[in-house]
Amino acid sequence: MLVQIILLMIFLIGPGPIIGQSEEWKAPEAADKLVNPLADDAKAVEKGKRIYYQVCAVCHGRTGVGDGPTGKTLATKPADHTSKAVQDQSDGALFWKISKGRDLMPTYLEVFSKTQRWQLVTFIRTLKNNDQ
């Protein structure tokens, strides 16, 4: 059901140009101080993977490179979670971005629990490109 709601939101907003997404998206410095309580937790990775595949993959793709079916239609490509630019961010910054959202990236503050958002961060860490 959640996936359908997100797809409906994207459909209603449309895949047109996104004002402001060409600017670098930086989390506040305070976010960098947040500590992931689930770092290196194998169960958290699996739970985060399930959430990611159900909700995030529609834009970011199953491998995280930003090539999901909806992501391909957007004027601004979704973040590549395998990239150095994403992987170099702190866990707290990723958690903050998942929580707050921006433009077509929805806020998940009310959708996912704090634990689920940390599970997503923990899973995103597994998407790191091995060439980095």
Image (tube, rainbow, N blue to C red):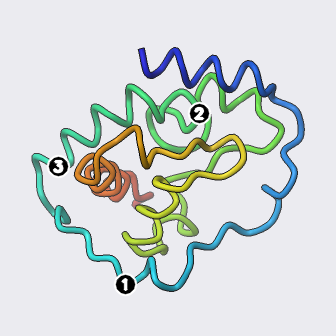
Q: Classify residue 49 as left or right of residue 63.
A: left
Q: Position of residue 61 (x, y in %)?
A: 52, 33
Q: Residue at x 28, y 54 (%)?
A: 114
Cα–Cα gap, marks 3 and 1: 20 Å
| Labelled pair 3, 2 in contact (Cβ < 8 Å) | no
> What residue is pinned by disc 2?
59
Front-lying residue, 37 or 50: 37
Q: Neighbour class for label 3 at 10 Å: few (<14), some, many (≥20)?
A: many
Q: Nearer the viewer, mark 3 or mark 1?
A: 1
**Residue, x 81% and y 25% (percent of image)?**
14
Residue beneath label 1, please?
33
Whole-angstrom CA distance, mark 2 to mark 1, is 28 Å
How many numbered markers are drawn? 3
Q: Is residue 99 left or right of residue 124?
A: right
Q: Which residue is mark 3?
A: 44
- Mark 2 residue crowding within 10 angstroms, few (<14) / some (14–19) / many (20+): many
x and y, in percent, of residue 98 in the image = 47, 53
The mark that comes first in sequence, 3 or 2, is 3
Above or below, 40 against 82 in this view is: below
Question: Which residue type does callout 1 highlight?
Answer: Lys
Comes first in the chain, label 3 or label 1: 1
Q: Describe residue 128's horizontal placement relative to residue 51 as left or right.
A: right
Disc 3 is placed on an element classified as helix
Q: What percent of the width, then of the height, locates residue 117?
A: 33, 51
Say which label, 2 or 1, has the lower sequence index: 1
Instruction: State the image coordinates of residue 62 (x, y, percent, origin top left).
Output: 44, 32
Give the residue type that dot 2 points to. Cys
- Residue in view at x 78 percent, y 27 percent: 13
* Picture layout, residue 102 above or below residue 38: above
Callout 1: 10 Å neighbours few (<14), some, many (20+)? few
Q: At numbered mark 2, what does the secondary structure look like: helix, strand or loop?
A: helix
- Of the numbered discs in the image, which one, if any, rests on residue 132? none
